[in-house]
């Protein structure tokens, strides 16, 4: 027995030794495999695993696409001929509250990157911390605006940098696991974004490089992207830190003189010609015509880069949608010249917002990529089926004031002598209702709010009547701010003042990016400053139970003949149904239902809002975005099929003014129409 036991022990040792040696071989093989994976710049060209490589890329942002469609949009990008995907990482999506990290659903960036890897696509990752991208606050979390003393964003401000370091200490270890040298898809990581158009704080950029190297190592290519001019490249490039300077420029510009300029801001031999943003279209604001670019000229400009061995990243390859309240905004010469972006981020890209590739731009650019690179043409992806669910009748469920106690949590109501910003009130997105009182005298009173961001609807009532019998008084807007004349209600006591302020999207570009929302100044009635304010943050989390709410009564409306209108464009709004027979309705909630027979019958669709005015729409509790057909040009909101379900589907609309006459919406297949007062 002793001999047998000894033999068993020897056998066990031999087996253990064999397993250990096998594991070592596997690990060595894995190390050798990763060691052979290398991406670098040499002789003014990109190199991948020992062979020269041309980047043919495109921006496809995971946070603008429902996760169920990530793979589909990547496959459509691959069929276009792209070998690389570029995406921003929006800080505000991943840290919505301080130290509250979110990496699920829309925020599951690791899943998105792994999908790209599975499809044999490389990734250029734009980690910010500032991203621009027509995204709220340029990707910064709005709670940064509550910190005192006020942060100097995009600078070497020590408090700001400490928060960036905390964010990157969470993000960059996730990124490091997916670097190309570690077996992942990420070949390049961008530092900041177009900083040369903003400032020249090299200490800030240098700090970001040191921080990135701490987590990502020295092998990965770090890059900056700036406009192709001497000034922007001088301010935004940091070649002394070993950071590659890429350029972007207008599609109509001659690229090769700019690529020669690019060489001056890279080390010798380290200036592979790359436009990190080749514009396939452009953004659109409310009130503008939808921006489009010619397919043939866009493809010709791309050909001039690719057929001469330059590299390009299409901005955008696929734009997607600004779901929820995440759209950005721009300003002009001052912050009052405010223009909010549409819900749609179609961008006139070759892959349309709803995934369509049967369009001239996709086909023209696909031919050029094939011609210049020799990459075989893949079959065109199948057309995405769309559903036409027809007219849906909506019923008014309640006015905002009827259910204020249901959509505003009492502990979250703020009280202050002066109005607080939305951010200081804890309301980062959407709407905030302000309340105060004053003594009305004379036939009318003059309300003045010197600084409101962005759009305020004003209501008044006699204080003894409470919230029910209020009257609509008008609008004060950031872009056309004028005092508002309010009729006297001849109240026996004080007059109650209600101001509903909409955050229409924070500025994402330029010197006015520190864009707080709400009432940001004193409020005056006849030159007297009002005090003692309450701020009611509105939450839409309970809209799934909206039909269970019992409305109290209809609001009393003010007549147009009694109350002057001050609005974005008075002539435009008079031409719309914004005010019907001199009566303004809303803000009110409407609910409708439509049935889908089975999961397979759930198709992409679009909600047409013709005849409606302005508001926000929810489908099955999902915020599909803002609508404003009274202003245009976008008239329909995209509803991806994964949001829908077999059986009953619920649409809830928060209309700020008045619905169309029939109280209907139309769920249609064809999104190719625009609207507005002049259409």
Image: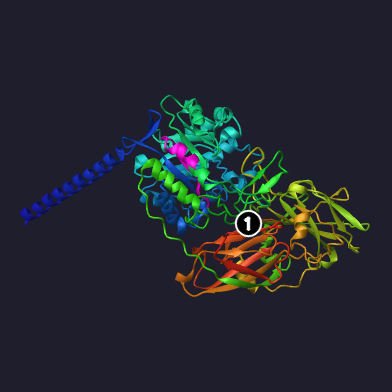
Relative height, residue 235 to residue 542 (above, below):
above
Residue 300 in view in this figure? yes
Measuring from the top left, give residue 473's x and y in whole percent.
82, 59
Residue farthest front in this picture? 296
Does 330 sit left or right of 297 as displayed? right
Is residue 314 on the magenta stretch? yes
- The range drawn in magenta is 300-319
328 or 149, which is in the foreground?
328
Does 371 sit left or right of 12 as displayed? right
Does 74 sit left or right of 326 as displayed? left
Does 224 sit left or right of 426 as displayed? left
Measuring from the top left, give residue 204's x and y in whole percent.
55, 32
**Measuring 15% from the left and 50% from the top, which residue is drawn there?**
15
Q: Quadrant of the N terminus?
A: bottom left
**Measuring 57% from the left and 32% from the top, which residue is drawn there?**
196
Measuring from the top left, give residue 557's x and y in whole percent.
81, 66
Relative height, residue 371 to residue 605 (above, below):
above
624 or 417, which is in the foreground?
624
Is residue 216 on the magenta stretch? no
Residue assigned mark 1 = 634
Relative height, residue 186 to residue 548 (above, below):
above
Residue 179 in view in this figure? no
Relative height, residue 596 to residue 139 (above, below):
below
Splitting the image into 4 quarters, where does residue 133 fall? top right
Characterize the local packing of mark 1: few (<14), some (14-19) or many (20 or more) Cα atoms within 10 angstroms. many
Splitting the image into 4 quarters, where does residue 632 fall? bottom right
Label 1 SS: loop
Measuring from the top left, give residue 559's x and y in whole percent.
84, 64
The colour scheme used here is rainbow
Numbered-mark total: 1
Q: Quadrant of the C terminus?
A: bottom right
110 or 40, which is in the foreground?
40
């Amino acid at each position: 027995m002793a001999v047998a036991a000894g033999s068993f022990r020897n056998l066990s040792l031999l087996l253990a030794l064999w397993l250990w040696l096998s594991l070592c071989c596997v690990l060595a093989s894995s190390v050798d495999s990763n060691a052979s994976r290398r991406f670098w710049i040499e002789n003014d060209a990109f190199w991948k695993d020992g062979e020269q490589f041309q980047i043919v890329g495109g921006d496809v942002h995971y946070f603008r696409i429902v996760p169920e469609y990530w793979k589909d949009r990547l496959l459509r990008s691959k069929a276009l001929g792209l070998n690389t995907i570029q995406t921003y990482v929006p800080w505000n999506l991943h840290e919505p509250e301080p130290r509250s990290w979110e990496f699920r659903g829309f925020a599951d960036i690791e899943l998105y990157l792994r999908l790209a890897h599975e499809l044999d696509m490389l990734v250029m990752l734009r980690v910010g911390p500032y991203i621009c991208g027509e995204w709220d606050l340029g990707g910064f979390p709005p709670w940064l605006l509550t910190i005192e003393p006020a942060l100097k964003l995009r600078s070497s401000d020590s408090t700001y940098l400490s928060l960036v370091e905390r964010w990157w200490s969470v993000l960059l270890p996730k990124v490091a696991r997916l670097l190309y040298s570690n077996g992942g898809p990420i070949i390049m990581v961008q530092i900041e974004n177009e900083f040369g158009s903003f400032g020249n704080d090299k200490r800030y950029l240098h700090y970001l490089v040191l921080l990135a190297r701490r987590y990502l190592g020295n092998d990965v290519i770090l890059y900056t992207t700036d406009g192709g001019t001497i000034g922007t490249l001088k301010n935004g490039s940091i070649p002394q830190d070993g950071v590659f300077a890429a350029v972007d420029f207008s599609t109509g510009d001659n690229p090769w003189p700019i690529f020669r300029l690019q060489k001056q801001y890279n080390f010798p031999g380290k200036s592979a010609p790359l436009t990190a943003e080749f514009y396939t279209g452009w953004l659109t604001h409310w009130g503008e015509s939808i921006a489009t670019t010619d397919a043939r000229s866009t493809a010709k400009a791309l050909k001039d880069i690719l057929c001469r061995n330059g590299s390009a990243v299409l901005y955008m390859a696929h734009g997607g949608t600004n779901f929820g309240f995440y759209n950005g905004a721009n300003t002009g010469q001052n912050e009052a010249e405010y223009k909010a972006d549409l819900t749609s981020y179609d961008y006139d890209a070759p892959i349309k917002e709803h995934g369509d590739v049967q369009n001239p731009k996709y086909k023209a650019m696909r031919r050029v990529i094939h011609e210049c690179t020799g990459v075989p043409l893949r079959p065109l992806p199948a057309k995405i089926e769309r559903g036409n669910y027809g007219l849906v009748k909506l019923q008014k469920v309640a006015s905002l004031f009827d259910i204020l106690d249901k959509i505003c949590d009492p502990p979250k109501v703020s009280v202050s002598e002066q109005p607080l910003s939305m951010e200081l009130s804890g309301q980062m997105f959407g709407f905030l209702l302000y309340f105060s009182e004053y003594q009305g005298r004379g036939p009318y009173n003059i309300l003045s709010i010197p600084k409101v961001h962005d759009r305020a609807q004003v209501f008044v009532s006699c204080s003894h009547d409470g919230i029910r019998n209020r009257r609509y008084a008008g609008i004060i807007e950031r872009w056309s701010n004028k005092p508002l004349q309010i009729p006297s209600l001849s109240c026996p006591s004080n007059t109650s003042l209600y101001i509903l302020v909409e955050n229409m999207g924070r500025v994402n570009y330029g010197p006015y990016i520190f864009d707080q929302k709400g009432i940001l100044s004193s409020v005056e009635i006849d030159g007297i400053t009002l005090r003692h304010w309450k701020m009611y943050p509105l939450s839409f989390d309970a809209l799934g139970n909206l039909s269970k709410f019992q409305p109290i009564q209809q609001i009393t409306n003010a007549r147009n003949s009694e109350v002057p209108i001050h609005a974005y464009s008075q002539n435009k709004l008079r031409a719309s149904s914004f005010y019907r027979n001199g009566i303004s309705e809303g803000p009110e909630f409407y609910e409708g239902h439509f049935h889908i027979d089975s999961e397979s019958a759930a198709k992409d669709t679009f909600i047409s809002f013709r005849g409606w005015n302005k508001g926000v729409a929810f489908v099955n509790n999902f915020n599909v975005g803002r609508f404003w057909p009274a202003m245009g040009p976008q008239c329909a909101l995209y509803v991806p099929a994964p949001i829908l379900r077999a059986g009953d589907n619920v649409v809830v609309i928060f209309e700020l003014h008045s619905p169309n006459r029939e109280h209907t919406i139309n769920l249609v297949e064809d999104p190719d129409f625009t609207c507005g007062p002049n259409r």
